[in-house]
Amino acid sequence: MALFQAIPSDGGHRRYDVKSPVTLESIGQFDCATDVEVRSAVERARKAQREWATRSFEQRAEVLWRLVDAIVERQDDIVDLVMKETGKTRMEAISMEVMAPCMQISHYAKRGGKYLATVHKRPSGILRFSKKISLVYQPLGVVGLITPWNGPVALAANPLAQALMAGNAVVHKPSEVTPFSAVLLKELTVAAGFPTDLYQVVQGDGQTGAALIEAGVDKVSFTGSVATGRKVGEACGRNLIPVTLELGGKDAMIVCRDADLDRAAEGAVRGSCFNTGHYCCGTERIYVPEAIYEPFVAKVVEQAKQLKQVESGDGDVGAVFWDKQMDIIEAHMADAKAKGARVLVGGERNRGLSGYFYPATVVVDVDHDMDLMRRETFGPIVAIQKVRDEEEALELANDSDYGLSGNVWTQDLRKGEAIAARMVTGSVSVNDIAVTYGIPEAPFGGVKESGVGMVNGEIGIRGYCHVHPIIVDTTKKAQGGYPYTREGADGLQKMVRTVFGNRLLRKLFV
Ligand code: NAD
C-alpha cells in the first residue's frame, strides 16, 4: 500500500493523500501550490522582508524567543503529530522535533546578533593608514527552504531561525510525505506573532520545489537526497542564486582495537538504529579489526536483540516512515544476502505489526560489492565488516562516494583525533555517534556527494547574508588619480622593486 498517493482533485491543483506508516490510515490530504501561487508567496515574502530587515537583532530575537515559547506550549501536539505522520518513537519525536528545535532557535536568538554584528577594522599593511573597512552582514532577501521527511520540524526550524535572524523572509516547501508538521510549525509562528508573510509554507511535491527555485528567491537552503540535490544545484546554477545542499550519507564507524567494546557496541546499535536509521548521519558501515571482531559482534547482537518495536511509539525503534524507504531497505538486504552476508538479528520486515516496521538488524560478512555498504540504506541496519587492522578500516571508510559524517572509537583520544583527521568526510565524532548537526559551533556540511556548503553556527548563519564591505578613505586629501604621468609610472615601478624585492619590507607592506 502506498503511504503517499495522488488522488483526483476538483481544481487545478495536484492533490495527495498521506497515510500514517504506523496505522496505514489516512491522516489527511493536501493540494500542491501552483507555480503562480508559489511565485505570489515569494512576492508577499519580499514585502514582509523589507520591514523585517529594518528590525534590530534584539527585536528579531524576541520573535524567535516567542517561537520557542509556542513550541514548549504545544509540545504534546508536535509529538503526537510527528509520531503519527512519521512513525518516530516518542523519545525521538521529543528529542529531535521538540528539544532540538528549542535548542537551535534559542542558540540563534541568543547569539545570532553577535555572529552578524558589523565588523570594523583597518586593512593590513600600508593601507591601514588611509582606509577603514566595515563588513556589514546584509540579508539576502527571500530564502527558499526545501526540506525532507526524516526531521520534519527540526530540519525546518533550524534553517528558519538562522535565515530570519539574518533578516530574511522564508518560503518553505516541506516534504510531501510530512506536510502536516509544516502546517503546525506555521501555526506556531502565528502564535509567536511573526509578521504576516515572513514565513510561508507552500505545500507540494518535487515539481513544487522546482517551481520555488524558479520563483525569484535569493537563496535556496536544501536538505534531501543526492539525486534531488543535483537537480536543485543545477537549477540554482542556472538562476545564479546561492545554495546549500545538505545531502545523503553512508557514514562509517571505525572501531579501534583498544576501544571500550561495551561503549562502542552501544554506539554501533544506537548510531545505526536512531530514528529508525532515517538519520542523514546514521552509522551505515562498521569496520572492526579481526582481533576484537568476535567479542564486538557478540555485544552488538546482545544489545540489538533487546530493542523493542511496538505500534504505540513507546519502543526503541519506530516505523519506517514510508513505503519507498521500505523498498530500498529490503532491496539492499536482499542484495547483501544474495552476495553472502549473514543476518544475526532481524533481517526481515516485522509483519507482526500492522504498519511499516523493520526491526533492528545486525548483518555481518558484508563487503563493498554490496549495495548495503555502498548506497544509502537509511534503515535500522547494523552492518559490520571484519578488517585486518585500523589502517584497512580507514581505507574502506574513505572508499565511498559519500562523505557526511562518521565516528571513531578508541580509548586513546589522540589516536582517535588522528584517525578522524584522515577520514575524508564532513565531520567525525570520537567515542560518540554523529552529533555535529546538534552542535552549532561545529559547522556542518558534507564532502563528495554528501553536499555543498556549510550550515549552522557562525559560518552557517553568515551564509544567509551578503558580506558587504564598506571601505572608507580616512585621509584629508584625495590619493592618486589623473592625470597619469611618466614620472608617476616610474615611481610606481621603483616602489614595487623596493618593497617587493625585499623580503622583510614585503612582509611589512601587506
Ligand atoms: P528528497 O530529495 O526526495 O526530497 C527532499 C525535498 O526535495 C522534498 O521536499 C521534495 O519534495 C523536494 N524535491 C524533490 N524534487 C525536487 C526538485 N526537482 N526540485 C526541488 N525540490 C525537489 O529527499 P527525502 O527522501 O525527502 O529525504 C531523505 C534524504 O535526505 C536522505 O538522502 C537523507 O540522507 C537526506 N538528508 C540529509 C540531511 C543533511 O543534513 N545532510 C539531513 C536530513 C536528510
Image (tube, rainbow, N blue to C red):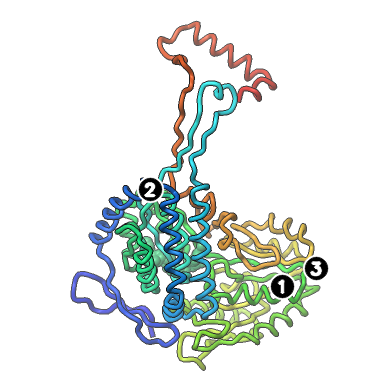
Q: Nearer the viewer, mark 2 or mark 3?
A: 2
* Callout in the foreground (1, 2): 2
Can residue 195 be seen?
Answer: yes
What residue does disc 1 label? 264
Residue type at tag 1: Ala
Is 63 in front, or is 46?
Answer: 63
- 355 left or right, relative to 35: right
Where is residue 383, by image quadrant? bottom right
Q: Are marks 1 and 2 in contact (CB under 8 Å)?
A: no
Q: Residues within 10 Å of mark 1 (few under 14, many from 20)?
A: many
Q: Which residue is mark 2?
A: 55
Q: Marks 1 and 3, Cα distance to the nearest angstrom?
A: 11 Å
**How many residues crowd around disc 3 within 10 Å: few (fewer than 14), some, or many (20 or more)?**
few
Image quadrant in which you'd find residue 360: bottom right
Q: Quadrant of residue 388?
A: bottom right
Question: What whole-number distance in Å separates the C-alpha atoms at marks 1 and 2?
Answer: 48 Å
Mark 3 secondary-structure assignment: loop
The residue singled out by tag 3 in the image is: 258
Viewer-closest of 423 and 20: 20
> Looking at the image, in which quadrant does ligand 1 appear?
bottom left
Taking the image as drawn, is residue 86 in sight? no
Q: Earlier in the sequence, mark 1 or mark 3?
A: 3
Amino acid on which the number 2 mark rests in the picture: Arg
Q: Residue at x 28, y 60 (%)?
A: 38
Percent from the top left, x then y, of residue 316? Answer: 58, 82
The vertical placement of 334 against 144, above or below, is: below
Mark closer to the chain start, 1 or 2: 2
Q: Is residue 449 above or below residue 292?
A: above
Q: Is residue 436 above or below residue 300?
A: above
Q: Characterize the local packing of mark 2: few (<14), some (14-19) or many (20 or more) Cα atoms within 10 angstroms.
A: few
Image position, residue 66 (x, y; %): 42, 62
**Of residues 292 and 469, the one drawn nearer to the viewer in this rendering:** 469
